[in-house]
Image: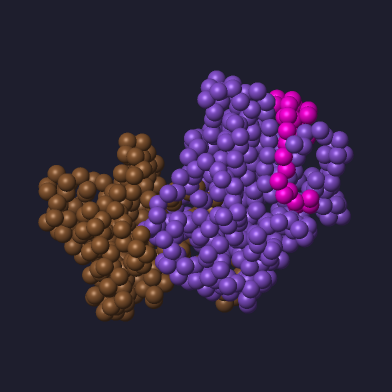
Amino acid sequence: MIAPETHVTIPKTTQQLFAGFYALLFASLTFATVISKEDYGYPITDRFAATVVGTPENYAAQLPQNIPFRQRSITIFPERVTPDVFFYGSKLLYSVALQDRKAPLIFLIAGTGASHNGSKNVNMARAFYQAGFHVVSISSPTFNNFVIAASQTGVVGHAEKDAEDIYRVFEMIWAELKTDIEVTSFNVTGYSLGGFNAAFVSKLDEERQTFNFERVLLINPPVSLYNSISLLDRMVDNIPGGVDNFDRFVDRLIHAYTTTYQESTVAAGDDFLYRAYRALDLKDEELAALIGTSFRISSSSLVFTSDVMADYGYIKPKGLPLDRYSDLTLYNEMSLRLGFTDYYHEFFYPYYSGDYPEEMRDQFIAAISLRSIEDYLRNSTKSP
Amino acid sequence: MKSILPHVATLVLALSLAACSSGPQPQPQAENYPEPVFTPKRLLPPDHADLTAVYDPWQGLNKRIYVFNYHFDQAVFLPVVRGYEAAVPSVGRTGVSNFFNNFEDMLTALNSALQLRPEKFLQSTGRVIVNSTVGLFGLVDVASEMEIPRPMEDFGQTLGHWGVGQGPYVVIPFLGPSNVRDGLGKIPDAYVQSTVKSDVLSEPLDLTTTILYPIDTRANTSFRYFENGSAFEYQMVRWLYSTKRELDVNQ
């Protein structure tokens, strides 16, 4: 949400408020696992607050503000006819920051529901570009544009199949880049779900060997995807009065947020979030509700996108065409009331189960875990 | 040549009227297809409130304008902004932004007066006086350095303050989300701004700034159509806009 070059001193339009509010909502999406180390040295001790707020400016690393971070687009499936309701998403958007000399290249994979130019990836791009890397940044396979343009099945959240989608994207991007740049080695990293993805991409690379990654860095990945999303799903229960009071809860947040926004003369960055958070004075349950709400908004969009792309008949009747002008209000309403766990049970498993009998459901879903490649991870020498 | 804004406002009116006559388009009916896993009946409580409801009787036309705005943004607006950012160094662009902000502050002063809000009136008037003099005709934002707060009031908010409701949601060509009240409110604001601007500036400068105004506004707006990852962007934007305007009026 945060554009790489936001240097305006006084936000002046409503649309910027959207950007800021989205940032507040989506700031929480790095949340995947709860760090148990007591003495982590992080300035914000409350785990929920730390999740929402990000790193206050004083503690943040000094990174270059102006790197040549450029957006590009690529067609992954030339034959694919994109459903008209997603007419804007047929090309996969990604970003690069390229050195003008021979250098190692690193791929960045964004976290759950996050985009290639979200604040986390932009910050990582700054760090790696400063350290001398060519940087290629891609959206999460759970990001709407990725599902539309680059997912083979449209039904995401499958460790191996997502890795195959990502690997295909890497290969096709590299095919375009290799005429322009010289590369000494390939590397891959990601945070949260992106870290999880990176592990499986690395495993796949051992077979395919297009890149022979030198280093693979997993930043705060969830061990079990299903456990993490169950946790996030349940956080919505913290909304006072339940999900049917979603609008009132968000109204209150926006109200408080707007107050801070109007009093503020800084751009909506992490430091602004920190001040907004201080001004809001949220209780732990409310922070949890905010994290849950953020995740729910993101997952509702993902679930609907998957449903349309696979034409599965999950909330949209199978075969019903939707175009760019269709009224999606009902689907928005419905998907906001469905958890990501519902998706795994009622859509994902039936879609992939094939020969698996119904009794296998829990094992099948539980297997979407780093434990399934534990031996590989233990024996790998690719960790930095 | 004064400003294009009044013309845009006229266009809004025309479109609002045109919208009245555009009926719903024939759509494939959901009940003619197999039931999905989750039906509205199964999922939504019988008396459920629409979580992100906004009065939008002209949705068919609004969505078309929204899509048009997206195409215009891609084909014209953003390329022009990129050219502007490449051609004019950052310090120059900040000066341009400050210059237009100064006019906005003037409108805020005016609208604060119309709403009988002395504090906001004094703050924004103070900003205009400081920035127009010490700040070299508004090019330097001295007032913010002096930490004078920057309230924002426009004529739409003034109407809201005196009890006028938002009315139906409207997507304005080129400009984006609005509603009937705020759309109409842009007309007096734009008129005052362009009148004052052409009074104080020579004709070539007036023309230059008229061209720069939309470019500067777009350059300072980080929003990108269909890039925020939401499959429900139209609804989300509509809801956030309406909520924001409601809060603006109440503040």
Q: Name the tint of chain B in the rendering.
A: brown
- Left or right: B30 as drawn, with respect to A5: right
Image quarter of residue A108: top right
Picture residue at 21% right of the left edge, 54% below the top: B137
Rendering coords of residue A155 (x, y %): 67, 46
Picture residue at 31% right of the left edge, 73% below the top: B120
Instruction: Determine whether B188 is above or below A137 in the image.
Output: below
Instruction: Determine whether B209 is above or below B193 in the image.
Output: above
Image quadrant in which the C terminus of chain A is located: top right
Residue bounds of the magenta highlight: A201-225
Q: How is the image coloured?
A: by chain
Picture residue at 60% right of the left edge, 42% below the top: A124
**Is residue B6 in sight in this rendering?**
no
**Is residue A41 in sight in this rendering?**
yes
* Of residues B59 and A264, the one drawn nearer to the viewer in this rendering: A264
Picture residue at 14% right of the left edge, 51% below the top: B201
Image quarter of residue B181: bottom left
Rendering coords of residue A64 (x, y %): 52, 41
Rendering coords of residue A317 (x, y %): 60, 55
Q: How many marks?
A: 0
Rendering coords of residue B73 (x, y %): 37, 45
Instruction: Determine whether A176 is above or below A15 in the image.
Output: above
Magenta residue check for A203: yes
Magenta residue check for B244: no
Q: Name the tint of chain A in the rendering.
A: purple
